[in-house]
Amino acid sequence: MLKDPSTKYRAFPAVGLVDRQWPSRTIGAAPIWMSTDLRDGNQALFEPMNAERKLRLFHTLCEIGFKEIEVAFPSASKTDFDFVRELIDGRHIPDDVTIEVLTQAREHLIRRTIESLAGARRAIVHVYNATSRPFREHVFGMSKAEVIDMAVAAVRLIRELTAEHPETRWVLEYSPETFTATELDFALEVCDAVTAAWGATPDDKVILNLPTTVEVTTPNVYADQIEWMHRRLARRDSVILSIHPHNDRGTAVASAELALMAGAERVEGCLFGNGERTGNVDLVTLALNLYTQGISPSLDFSDINAVARTVEHCSRLPIHPRHPYVGDLVFTAFSGSHQDAIRKGLAVQPADGPWSVPYLPIDPADVGRSYDSVIRVNSQSGKGGIAFLLESEYGVVLPRRLQVEFSRAVQEHTDTHGGEMTAAEIWQLFARTYLEIDRPIRYLEHHLYEHGAAQGIRLKLEIGGRVHLLSGEGNGPIDATVHALRGIGLIVEVRSYEERSMAGRGSDASACAFLELASAGHAGECYGVGIDGNIVTASVRALINGVNRLPMVAIDDLDVQAA
Ligand code: KIV
Ligand code: ZN
């Protein structure tokens, strides 16, 4: 039993905005998006990203269409400082993208921050200090006036230091951290002091970012707070009103949406809701929520799986299988009645007509996905029965996305042949689909060699009845095989890799490798599976098996002369 909470916790006080306008507004256009994946998201990781992963994610954010990206907290670590330098010196920043960096409102940190940005074409300097009573009284031991002085002194110093670098177009962002727990009239006083100290004008707007540093109440109260500020801020035409919701109560998306109705113009968050504690607001969900209301989000999630795999690779965090729009299972129906309604809806859905398929709030194809129905294989196995039977009878634990992919083959089989499938029949179908596909390319053997730090592979394949020798180098056996295949014009990308042992199978104990492949010019991914006593051989076989399953692979397409 939970304890009686009434003495320990108190309801958050209402704002008392009687003439609030936001409940009758709708969102008519995409806000300015700011990705803080490389800052707030990064600082919340077990293992913060190294430069290679940060750069990869930065490029992905640019490709998605973000124009403002908070890339680092340069005064907090050398890695972050060096990363900002690498972006600028390495000319990685597209002309239409502005990088942003965070600093506390302290002199030596501000100096180091401005130093990190030397030579940037355009930069947002994001300065913050906490403003709520607990911080003033217990953390800083400062009066309200001293907290205002701290913010104003920081802004003046940033003005002075940035004036020494006129080659950069500077933008100031100020965050009263812990805004939602701050007395509103005091938050207003600090924000107005900041815009005055900067000398904000309509041509030199200040971004005022009002965060739910910790989400403490319902989204309607946040919306009231935002509307209250929006209607009272001095120099409103010289301010970009920004929000930065966290997700402690699980309502960050709702908070952001209501705050946009209440006058906010800009949203800071992370892809798939990464970030401190329960995360920052999920920008993908926000963007696709807009999309499903007929509003272009100005962000490209047409290949959402590619974005997801990059984010998982860079953050080393998995995305929940039921995460909105992207989870492995969100376009998968298990229930028979759902499957039936979806099939009937899809059958009559006009190609260009308004979307109205039951149970699917978005056309999966718009985000590069497909609809999958996962069938009940027999009365004992229930949901997920295919995976259950393969694991319990054959010791093969399928990755979840492969379960979904394979369920389509099972569905086709039962549609054609009718009835239920036994475990043996499912295994035979699995083997035919993933393991016994040696056309047009048949794996014969391989040899590994070292070349300096690189891993080399010599690969013997049979293609169209003739033996070919290919070689390639990479950062491991799989990468080397990918490079070797380029020799015959096969350009594939490995989106994910998993290996499992089929332990418990006695003397047949084997390694099983699962590779998810994508190929240029073809939407979606497909799996390759390899089984062998040796894990490297299993991986190479998985890659060749997967390549044989790609739609483009026909003998005539291969540049076998070159091999
Ligand atoms: O959550 C927060 O308040 C922050 C600020 C630095 C904007 O991340
Ligand atoms: Zn934050």
Image: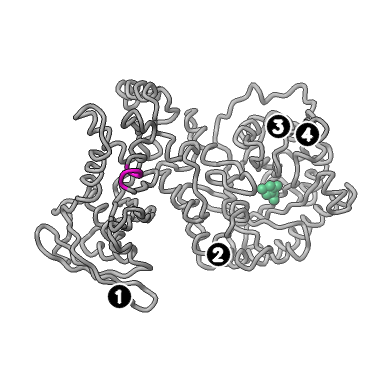
Q: Position of residue 361 (x, y in %)?
A: 45, 28
The first of marks 2 and 4 along the sequence is 2
Marks 2 and 4 sit apart, C-alpha to C-alpha, by: 38 Å
Q: Is residue 53 above or below residue 181?
A: below
Q: Is residue 474 above or below residue 357?
A: below
Q: Position of residue 43 (x, y in %)?
A: 62, 56
Q: Residues within 10 Å of mark 4 (few under 14, many from 20)?
A: few
Which amino acid lies under the numbered mark 1 shown in the image of this protein? Tyr
Marks 3 and 1 sit apart, C-alpha to C-alpha, by: 62 Å
Q: Secondary structure at mark 2?
A: helix
Q: Secondary structure at mark 1?
A: strand
191 lies left or right of 275: right
Q: Secondary structure at mark 4?
A: helix
Q: In the rendered structure, are the residues bearing label 4 and label 3 in contact, judged by CB atoms less than 8 Å apart?
A: no
Q: Residues within 10 Å of mark 1 (few under 14, many from 20)?
A: few
Foreground: disc 4 or disc 1: 1
Is 196 in the magenta? no
Residue in the picture at 17% in, 58% down: 442
Foreground: disc 3 or disc 1: 3
Which amino acid lies under the numbered mark 3 shown in the image of this protein? Met
Marks 4 and 3 sit apart, C-alpha to C-alpha, by: 45 Å
The first of marks 3 and 2 along the sequence is 3
Which residue lies under the disc numbered 1? 449
- Label disc, if present, on residue 232 of the rendered structure: 4
Query: Magenta span covers which residues?
Result: 390-394
Which residue in the rendered view is the most extreme toward the left? 465
Which residue in the rendered view is the most extreme toward the front? 506
82 lies left or right of 362: right
440 lies left or right of 166: left
Q: Position of residue 385 (x, y in %)?
A: 35, 35
Location of the C terminus (image quadrant): bottom left
